[in-house]
Each structure stands twice: as C-alpha cells, then as structure tokens.
Amino acid sequence: MTALKTLIFTMIVPGTVTVLIPYLLLSSDVQQWFPVKFGVVRFFGPVPMLVGILIYLWCAWDFTFTGRGTPAPIDPPKELVVKGLYRYVRNPMYVGVLLILLGEALLFESVVVLLYALLLLSASHLFVVFYEEPTLARMFGASYERYRQSVRRWLPRVLMKKKE
C-alpha cells in the first residue's frame, strides 16, 4: 500500500513539477522572450535528467521500504532515512528533481525552464528550512540532530584523507 501511495505522489507532485509545468512553459509565449541557443551543450541535457530520475527513484524507494512512508508530507516516513543517498546529503530527492529540470533546460535550450528551476530551488530551500527540518526535529529528536550535524543539507562533504 505504501508503494502505491509513493507512486501516486510521484506521478502527481514530481510529475507536475518536472513534466507538466516545463511543458506549459516551453509551449507558452514566455519562451519566446528568451531566444537563446545553447549549441552542442544541449545534447548533454539527458545526462542530468537521467541522473535526477535515478536519484529520485532511489530516494523514493528508501522512503517507502526503509522509512515505511512516502515522500508526501502528509504521509512521511515513520523511520528516519539515513541510508543510500541520504548518507551524503539530507535532501537528495530535491537535488534529483532539480537535476531533471537542469537537463530539460539544456535539452530544450530554455532559459525559462532554467529560471523556473532556480525559483523551485529557492522555494525548496525555504520549505526545507522552515517546515521540513523543524518537523523532522520534532519527530526524530536527538537522532535527527546528530544526522543534521554530520550530513549537509544540499551538497555532500568532500571526503579527504588527512595527511599523517
């Protein structure tokens, strides 16, 4: 049942964010305001798109089967998920969605989709800081605080060996 709820959420929310809204932006007149050609770079667009899709699916899997919940805020995981990509950043699912949008912006040579991705990044950051993190702190207490201290929000720590 949880897997079905995750699938439905994925089709509705990330599907809208990464498919429907970019489609509407690309087919609207606003796209014509930014006539930019990315040249050969556009052909690299599918790479971040594929990486982003794989990141999202991996994270949704971990939420469903490790956390025993869904990515939906109304049905969050019952267990704190700190495995998989969550060992490296606290919000890899958002990173995956943003990579999909970056790839779409490149592939379709769209400054509008790129601006939309930046707007979404800003909105996601505010949502994480003002809703998700306080909620997770209440739900998981000290274990979330330890996790928060050891794993960065958006970018992974660079692992470097100390010189002895």
Image (tube, rainbow, N blue to C red):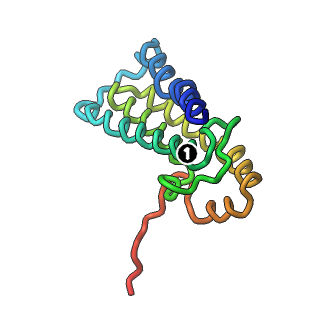
Whether residue 31 sits left or right of residue 2 in the image: it is left
Secondary structure category for the residue under label 1: helix
Taking depth in this image into account, of 119 and 58 the one nearest to the observer is 58
Q: Where is residue 70 in the image (x, y as percent from the top left)?
A: 61, 38
The residue at which mark 1 appears reads as 65
Give amino acid for label 1: Phe
Q: Is residue 33 above or below residue 143?
A: above
Position in image of residue 48 (x %, y %):
36, 39
* Residue at 68% from the left image edge and 37% from the top image edge: 75
Q: For residue 164, which quarter of the picture?
A: bottom left
- Identify which residue is drawn at 61% across, 44% down: 125
For this orientation, the residue located farthest to the front is 1
90 above or below 147? above
Give coordinates of residue 10: x percent, y percent: 54, 30
Say which quadrant the N terminus sits in: top right
Report the front residue among 67 and 97: 67
Residue depicted at 42% across the width and 18% down the height: 26
